[in-house]
Image (cartoon, rainbow, N blue to C red):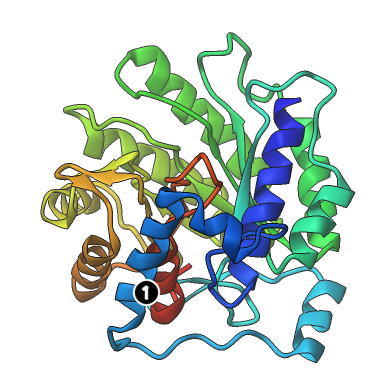
Amino acid sequence: MYAKKHIIFIIILATTLILNGVGIAAGQSAAQTSRHPEAQSAMRSADMYESQPATIPAVQPASQPAARAMRAAPPGRPIIMNDSVYTSWGTPIRGASEGLEASEPSYTVTVEQLRALRDNGLNTLHLYIEHPYTGKPVGEQAEKCDQIIEDAAREGMYVIITIGWIELMTEEDVQFFYDFWELYSKRYKDNENVIFEMANEHNWPKNGPEVVANAYKIIRKNAPDTMVLLFSFAVSPGPEHLIPRIKDTEKLADIDWSNAAIAFHAYESEEGYFGADYLIEVIDAFTEAGYPIINTELPNRFALTSYPDMALFRVMEERGLS
């Protein structure tokens, strides 16, 4: 039941994004919107941002013939473009998330679900495969993941794979981290539609630079050509705190930023609300420091109406941020 609800929400969210940035989900009228102050607040926030000039021109959507060509062929390896991670066709990554780590053994992501995402304008599935707190060994979901990646390639879609949840605060966690990437980086090194996100919302232990650098080295040893996303924190510590952590990690691993990027989530900052103004600060700080970035999770702030924060979407669209 959870899986079905999750996929339905993904489709609604995708449809919301496609309607020219208008914050009305499919099946909801403007009259319905007016009954929800949370939704009105989101729209006001989006309108306020819309009145500001974009510093980078908006990325234009692919033409219909180009879109059909994308669906007809498996994706090539993603590229760094416009200070972000782009598809091999030169378009921003646009995706939705699903998790296998705590699902029932029979559950998977089907071809029909992938096509529904693709037909709603998305090109990527963000897939949480495993985590160390299920009691299952690394590789438990490998065969299921093989099929999803194969199906996604046929449907012209990328798959970002990651550890769904890991604290990295114990020796057991760190060993799981290393074992996961030893297995999966070897397994998918030749799959051009696969992107590796090192861990979803991990903590930063005292030896964080060493732990992340070691995992990066494992990946690069086995999969030198695969795009790698690093530093996916749940609460953004802010560029002024995160950039020193990146530099400390760079001292221990030769990170190739032509084939790697900083991933971040936009739930909240250390100061609280992660709004459009703060997002602009984050984008500017990282890109000016020479680091490409990608957002791999966005909040659904207004759960009552399923309205995302449209102001954040407008910033990302106008900046061409994946």
Percent position of residue 302, x then y: 45, 45
Percent position of residue 236, x then y: 26, 46
Tell me, yes or no, if residue 294 can be seen here: no
Query: Considering depth in this image, is 305 or 116 the residue closer to the camera?
Result: 305
Looking at the picture, does residue 16 appear above or below residue 88? above
Which of the 4 image quadrants contains residue 217?
top left
Taking the image as shown, residue 221 lies to the left or right of residue 293, namely right
Query: Considering depth in this image, is 17 or 194 the residue closer to the camera?
Result: 17
| Residue at image coords 46%, 76% | 317
Tell me, yes or no, if residue 75 can be seen here: yes
Taking the image as shown, residue 83 lies to the left or right of residue 129, namely left
| Residue at image coords 29%, 19% | 169
Within 10 Å of the Cα at label 1, are there few (<14), some (14-19), or many (20+) other Cα atoms? some
Taking the image as shown, residue 118 lies to the left or right of residue 170, namely right
Query: Considering depth in this image, is 210 or 41 the residue closer to the camera?
Result: 41
For label 1, the residue is: 47
Query: Considering depth in this image, is 88 or 191 the residue closer to the camera?
Result: 88
